[in-house]
Amino acid sequence: MRWLLRKRNGAPVNRFGNKWELGLLECSRTVVTSCRAVLLPRFGRPEVLELRDNVKVPDLKSNEVLVRARAVSVNPLDTRMRSGYGRSLFEPLLPLILGRDISGEVAALGGSVRSFSVGQEVFGALHPTAVRGTYTDYAVLAEDELTSKPASISHVEASAIPFAALTAWRALRSTARIKKGQRVLVVGGGGAVGFSAIQLAVAAGCHVSTTCGGESVDRLLAAGAEQAVDYTTENYEVAIKGYFDAVLDTIGVPETERIGINLLKRGGHYMTLQVQKRSYSISFSSLSLLLIMVQSFCPVCYRGRLHP
């Protein structure tokens, strides 16, 4: 680890006064050399995952941040990768550490990182192709994969937000470009992506309808949906009236696709989360876009209006 003395507030040279501070030039070694991690040695069912001690923590690059994990979450990409999704890409790299989402505290900084400080609470998400994920005591993320954690939410809540909310944000704001006063239908509002989509659409001033299981109806209405139809007891194709500017289908089966398209206004946007090989490359093709979306929806978190 190399250090330098740098001027504070542009003050002149004064090594022994109060105008200099000790600053990190390059963090080539991290403060932690090993930690616990959940590893994926081979593809398969959940039982193949192994908790191991003394897993090496890599040295930080200049743009990286070492985060002490306080909470992580499991999302569909993690379970599909564990089962063999992307095998041709990831099998030569086994064992992997899965996990995309994380909330925790900054433990160390790379030399060029200026957005955060040690001890600061942060949350964020790794790129889908990362081979050292967040299922570990200490995770390494690039500076532009993190943002400050709002004080209004817990680490557990924060860890459930990034991938689900970013997926919803990408669909509603980047693809459909929803606007105040438009009608939005979320098919499958009870899941993480659907629940995030409802809150983001409501925050944008849209009129939101959704479908869900009976146990989620009250929660989704409380989140701002104007109509929540229990698909287990009602034919939502009949129960939902009118047409929509945007339909986000988080289920992605032929029946929901047919109904969703039939409920679109002329020129509306139908978006599905049906898993295809190209889905993730389209949704998460750019880390810079990931940062933009994190920073864009965070004001909603800070105002206490987005919940996982």
Image (cartoon, rainbow, N blue to C red):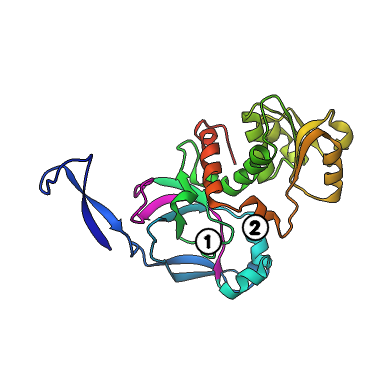
Placement of the C terminus among the 4 image quadrants: top right
Q: Residue at x 33, y 64 (%)?
A: 28
Q: Which residue is mark 1?
A: 133
Amino acid carrying label 2: it is Leu
* Label 2: element kind: helix
Whichever of callouts 2 and 1 sits on the residue coming sooner in the sequence is 2
Q: Relative to residue 178, is residue 119 depicted above or below?
A: below
Where on the picture, by quarter, is residue 191?
A: top right
User: Mark 2 sits on what residue?
Assistant: 77
Q: Position of residue 185 (x, y in %)?
A: 76, 35
- Give percent across and percent down for residue 35: 42, 66
The residue type indicated by label 1 comes to Gly
Q: Residues within 10 Å of mark 2 (few under 14, many from 20)?
A: some
> Does residue 262 appear left or right of residue 284 in this picture?
right
- Mark 1, secondary structure of its residue: loop
Q: Is residue 274 left or right of residue 93?
A: right
**Measuring 65% from the left and 30% from the top, which residue is drawn there?**
202
Quarter of the figure with the N terminus: bottom left
Farthest residue toward the left? 16
Magenta segment range?
Answer: 96-119
**Residue 75: image tag:** none
Residue 159 visible at all: no
Q: Are marks 2 and 1 in contact (CB under 8 Å)?
A: no
